[in-house]
Image (cartoon, helix red, strand yellow):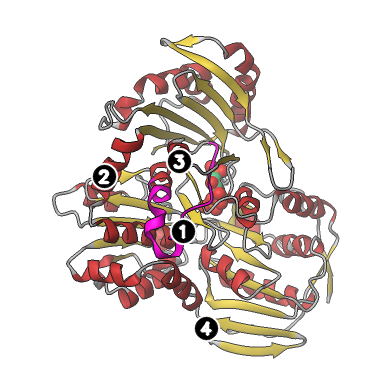
Amino acid sequence: MKMSTKAYNDQKPGTSGLRKKISVFKQKNYLENYIQSIFDCLNNKQGKTLIIGGDGRYFNEKAIQIAIKMAAANGFGKVIIGQNGLLSTPAASHLIRHNKAFGGIILSASHNPGGENGDFGIKYNISNGGPAPQKLTDAIYKRTQIIEEYFIDEFKFIDLSNIGSTKINNLEIEIINPVTDYAFLMEELFDFEAIKAMFQGGFEMRFDAMHAVNGPYAEQIFCDMLGASKETLLNCTPSTNFGGFHPDPNLVHAKELYELMMSKNAPDFGAATDGDGDRNLIIGRGIFITPSDSLAILAANLHLIKGYKNGISGIARSMPTSMAADRVADALGVPIYETPTGWKFFGNLLDDGRITICGEESAGTGSNHVREKDGIWAVLAWLNILAVKKQSAKQVANEHWAKFGRNYYTRFDYEEIELDKANKLMKRLNEKLDSLVGNEEEGIKISTADSFSYHDPVDGSLSENQGLRILFENGSRIIFRMSGTGTIGATIRIYIERFEPADGEINLDTQVALKQLIDIAKSISDIEELTGRDKPSVIT
Ligand code: G16
């Protein structure tokens, strides 16, 4: 059936697909308009397979029903859907690859809050399992501006709770267990026997799924397969509003876990993942491991894990991620790639075999096993390394810094700033960059200041305006960037980093170690004057 639609011109995807308030998504034809715009940009989809799933937030099931009917009307041959509409983002990526599907639709606003007044999101992943590349998201956006009709079949509500296959019109609809195939993949990559033995030996972990999609994954993998006790699981029942919490695994929203890990009663290891299960938080007893350090430490030890025993071909990190991984790449003699923020930029490097592992400061770590960051994978990688090394997370981190030196790193987020003010700040700073080069700020000389551009070495594409960088002669960096995932106003992020060599002071408090650079960042940008904020909303 053909429907005429009202055109929306604000369907501009951000860092990771289209993300808006639920109230926006509920507007008549809004979701349909975007799905049709995606389908209109895909050639040769007739008869092909589409994976569909989401993080279980409010509106998930409704959106999936619409997506199924539109897939039917647009000529897809088959849809594979997670039971009850649930699929973690990495599991969806795996299913696309495993089933050689044409692509996938993932319904999620990731770490953003859910519920009736929360956020919703949709993104399209291509046949390699990864997020649509920039070229495709640009085409989809263009299409949303001119689209006039969409195609939808009329059929009864599909019961997503029953595992099995049915055929309606020409569409085969298969509902699968969302965990099974993903759990097999994890078992192939990691040494489950070694991890199991560690749990049997009394190792204790707390895993916080933040009331989100990874609950069932954690229960099956950590408890049923690896023998961890049920006490391991915190907030592991998915809920449409994430229990009223914000499913973002950072030190603010996973505060309880953090406090437990810093307390006298801390278990050996703590971890959390976000709304759609791709972000991760790693906290050892008495130590928070920054995502940048986690990437570097995993890269340095990945060869200890059976799925990576032949070593790694290269490492990639997003530009604002600390340069800790660069030191590991140097030591291993493998290339390091610096990409713009957004997992989609890793896709070509992974497909081309140039890298094995990649990660981002925004709590994302992953490898060539899928084309998304993967929260459970990161936890298992840590567990596997701890099991092999027979050390605590703190010992592993300290040993790493004693060998490679330490990149002290912090991120300041100024959230919900009025868009005008945020744009003004970034514009002013951008215009000022050239005049900063050569200046000495508190005794440290600025060597480069620019707006980051990336030339993809595989397809030659150019991505400009990916954040403002101020680089100092001593290797320190201050980076300013506007978030692409917020839904209210603008979020400005400042990323601050300083390198301390292995024989230097590697055990300072991070905020103390970075105090001087933090002051420089504030004064160069005038962020507090221009935004009226006297402190960041979140410090990581
Ligand atoms: C998304 C992307 C990540 C990216 C992050 C940046 O994360 O998938 O690759 O690092 O956005 O967020 P921001 O633009 O706010 O700094 P997610 O977990 O929200 O899908």
Three-letter code, disc 2: Ile
Precedes in sequence: disc 3 or disc 4: 4
Q: Which residue is mark 1?
A: 310
Q: Which residue is mark 4?
A: 161
In what element is the residue under mark 2? strand
Q: Is residue 514 magenta?
A: no
- The Cα atoms of the two marked residues, 1 and 2, are separated by 30 Å
Segment tinted magenta in the rendering: 297-319
| Residue at mark 2: C-beta within 8 A of ligand 1 | no
User: Gap in Å between the C-alphas at discs 4 and 1?
Assistant: 41 Å
| Circle 3 SS class | helix
Residue that mark 2 sits on: 287
Residue 465 percent coordinates (x, y):
67, 33
Callout 1: SS: loop
Image quadrant in which the N terminus is located: bottom right
| Image position of 465 (left or right of 108) | right
